């Protein structure tokens, strides 16, 4: 990709729209494919294709230490962050799952110990944390049980907490990747992370008896299309766009997908999956996104100053 305005706009559109639509794709996929099996197949196919591309283009395979680090990061980030959503969407609407995931930036504030001196001495960031926690409490307290027969009965609250735990795992994996330097290409790292996650997901699927209850004949065309969409659009197009944007634009700008994804997920969930979103969930979304905005505000101001938009 060339560093031009049109390419950058396409890449932003990719992470905004495609990643926002993956919540619905997961919902459609797990209708007839169990969540761990779906995730295992997704990352197995995506990882094989990406690894083949890396090897064909001459990218070096990582050494043992980098292989272990990437495998650990993949299981934490993709396994914890993404697979937790797939499992939880058996019990919560895809729109609710997307709202919970917006809390992710707060975990970075709470868990990135090396940045605590900056984070916790900044009153604006602490105010953003407060808004985020209020939003999550509102969501977990007033989210209603499904009344449209879209989800399995029960386990709504555990589903919410599983997604939050997945966010913690994603953050820990991201911080390990951030502070453990590697000389391998980002694409090669991504392929190893996907394949490691696939192995773990398939093992969990086997251990949890998903295979025993699974029948290939019952898989719907809708679920197959959703799986392929997750592989090629979610794990390839959007992921590669994300990697590209990180190389040409400041991370604080790239992270704006956090604001757009839940809106896309809510709209698609309502239109295609007949999901309902109640007033407390809307208020929770507003509070969490407002908190994320406040947390990132110091970085936005610093970015504008560095670009000469604001004068010191």
Image (cartoon, helix red, strand yellow):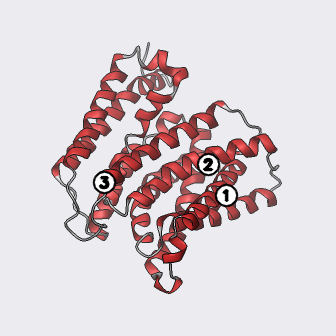
- Identify the residue position indicated by label 1 in the image: 195
Gap between marks 2 and 3 measured at Cα: 24 Å
- Label 1, secondary structure: give it: helix
> In this rendering, is residue 125 above or below 212?
above
Alpha carbon separation for disc pair 1 and 2: 8 Å
| Neighbourhood count class around disc 2 (C-alpha, 10 Å): few under 14, some 14–19, many 20 upward | many
- According to the image, label 2 marks what residue? 74
Q: CA distance from mark 3 to mark 1?
A: 28 Å
Looking at marks 3 and 1 on the same chain, the residue that comes earlier in the sequence is marked by 3
Q: Which residue corresponds to the image point at 44% horizontal and 76% vertical from the top-left?
A: 32
Circle number at residue 226: none
Mark 2 or 3, nearer chain start: 2
The answer to which of 310 and 297 lies nearer the viewer is 297
Number of callouts: 3
- Mark 3: secondary structure: helix
Q: What mark, if any, has residue 96 been given in the picture?
A: 3
Residue reaching furthest to the bottom: 217
């Amino acid at each position: 990709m060339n560093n031009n305005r049109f390419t950058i706009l396409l890449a932003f559109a990719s992470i905004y729209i495609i990643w926002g639509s993956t919540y619905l794709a997961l919902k459609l996929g797990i209708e007839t494919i169990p969540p761990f099996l779906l995730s295992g197949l997704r990352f197995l196919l995506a990882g094989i294709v990406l690894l083949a591309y890396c090897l064909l283009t001459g990218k070096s395979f990582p050494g043992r230490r980098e292989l272990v680090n990437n495998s650990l990061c993949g299981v934490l980030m993709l396994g914890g962050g993404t697979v937790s959503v797939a499992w939880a969407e058996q019990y919560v609407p895809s729109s609710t799952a997307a709202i919970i995931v917006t809390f992710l930036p707060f975990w970075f504030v709470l868990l990135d110990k090396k940045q605590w001196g900056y984070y916790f001495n900044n009153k604006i960031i602490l105010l953003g944390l407060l808004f985020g926690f209020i939003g999550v409490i509102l969501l977990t307290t007033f989210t209603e049980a499904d009344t449209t027969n879209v989800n399995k009965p029960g386990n709504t609250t555990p589903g919410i907490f599983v997604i939050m735990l997945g966010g913690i795992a994603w953050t820990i994996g991201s911080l390990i990747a951030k502070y453990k330097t590697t000389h391998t290409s980002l694409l090669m790292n991504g392929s190893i992370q996907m394949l490691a996650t696939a192995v773990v997901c398939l093992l969990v699927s086997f251990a949890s008896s998903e295979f025993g209850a699974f029948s290939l004949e019952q898989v719907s065309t809708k679920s197959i299309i959703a799986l392929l969409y997750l592989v090629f659009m979610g794990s390839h197009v959007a992921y590669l766009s994300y990697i590209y944007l990180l190389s040409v634009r400041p991370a604080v700008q790239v992270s704006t997908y956090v604001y757009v994804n839940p809106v896309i997920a809510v709209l698609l969930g309502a239109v295609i999956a007949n999901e309902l979103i109640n007033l407390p969930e809307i208020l929770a979304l507003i509070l969490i996104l407002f908190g994320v905005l406040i947390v990132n505000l110091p970085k936005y101001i610093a970015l504008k100053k560095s670009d000469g938009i604001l004068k010191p």
